Image (cartoon, rainbow, N blue to C red):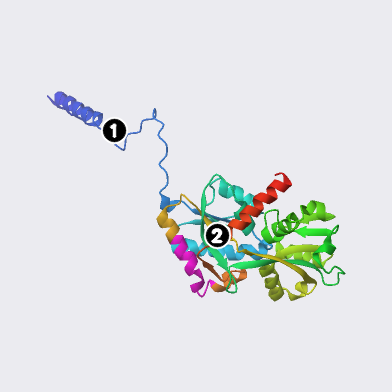
Amino acid sequence: MAKKAVLLILAALALLFAGCGDEKGFIDFTRHAAAPAAPAAERPLVIAFAPVMSPEETRRPYERMTAYLAEKLGRPVTMVQKRGAAELDQLVAAGEADVAFLSTGAYTAYRGHEPIELLAMVETKGTILYRTFVIVAADSEIEDFASLKGRVFAFVDPLSHSGRLAVDYRLLEEGLTPEQYFGRIFYTHHHDKSIWAVANHLADGASIDNQIYEHIEQTNPQLAAKVRIIDELAVAPTGPVVVRQNLAPEEKEQLRRIFYEMADDEAMRPVLQSAVIDRFVPPDGGLYEPLRQKFLAHERLSGE
């Protein structure tokens, strides 16, 4: 009798476990289900930039801005630093950055597969425009742009507006390229390095962002005193902050609000100013279109 009872219990247990084959606790090793994607709130927001001044001067404020965004968004935010504008454009084009601080030239040259949209512009000293200064050494005999023909010229980056393209557009009016006009050109990759190169006679001239020059006047007056301005080229809109177009609308709106209000935070004002930013303001996309057309004309002339 006891033996029969045991057999009945075992049979009942077998039926019970047979009915649990599709429950959570059952692992079917013959299936290859994909791991569930991490919730959007857990995925880090990726912010990218390329320094316009030496990395040691630029990285700290961008790290602070990244931490500030993470705090305000309540989610992880990762910062990616690229060496130059072309690398940054490539990162954005591959969809590997959610937000990017683009230079004016990088934005007007952007033609990536990943659609982007303007989020904000930089305002400094009450303006969203800046100029290109052409500088020479303070003790140089060169007095004007024409006198730089055949000389050594320092550029910042191939896609920097003030650090290359503004000069390209100036020479484009004469049907020339910098390679044809100057005796030799080289790249410093940072505006302050271009100032240093001219001050130390490694280059006869250079083109730089006037806002960076004025920042150097305040932070390193000894270096600024070793160069002088011989020409100013046309004004241009400041570099924008852009976002992936397919970022969720509510995320974009939240980012806009955070960027526009960042300068209202007393702790963030000196951080922004150290990156030559007073505040972020709503962008004016129309300001970039003439430069986009100039870039296309420049590409046609250079055969790129």
Q: Quadrant of residue 213?
A: bottom right
Vertical position of residue 267 compared to residue 118: above or below: below
Q: Quadrant of the N terminus?
A: top left
Towards the viewer: 98 or 147: 147
Q: Which residue is mark 1?
A: 22
**Lateral position of residue 103 relative to residue 189, left or right:** left
Which residue lies under the disc numbered 2?
286
Magenta segment: 254-268
Alpha carbon of mark 2 to alpha carbon of mark 1: how far?
59 Å
Which residue ends up furthest to the right in the rendered image? Answer: 141
Camera sees residue 194: yes
* Amino acid on which disc 1 is placed: Asp
Is 222 colored magenta in this rendering? Answer: no
Residue 293, horizontal then vertical, whole percent: 63, 53
- Percent across and percent down for residue 32 are 41, 31
Where on the picture, by quarter, is residue 57? Answer: bottom right
Q: Tell me if residue 202 can be seen.
A: no
Local crowd size for mark 1, using a 10 Å CA cut-off: few (<14), some (14–19), many (≥20): few
Percent x, y of residue 211: 66, 69
Q: Nearer the viewer, residue 173 or 125?
A: 173
Q: Amino acid at mark 2?
A: Gly
Which quarter shows the C terminus? top right
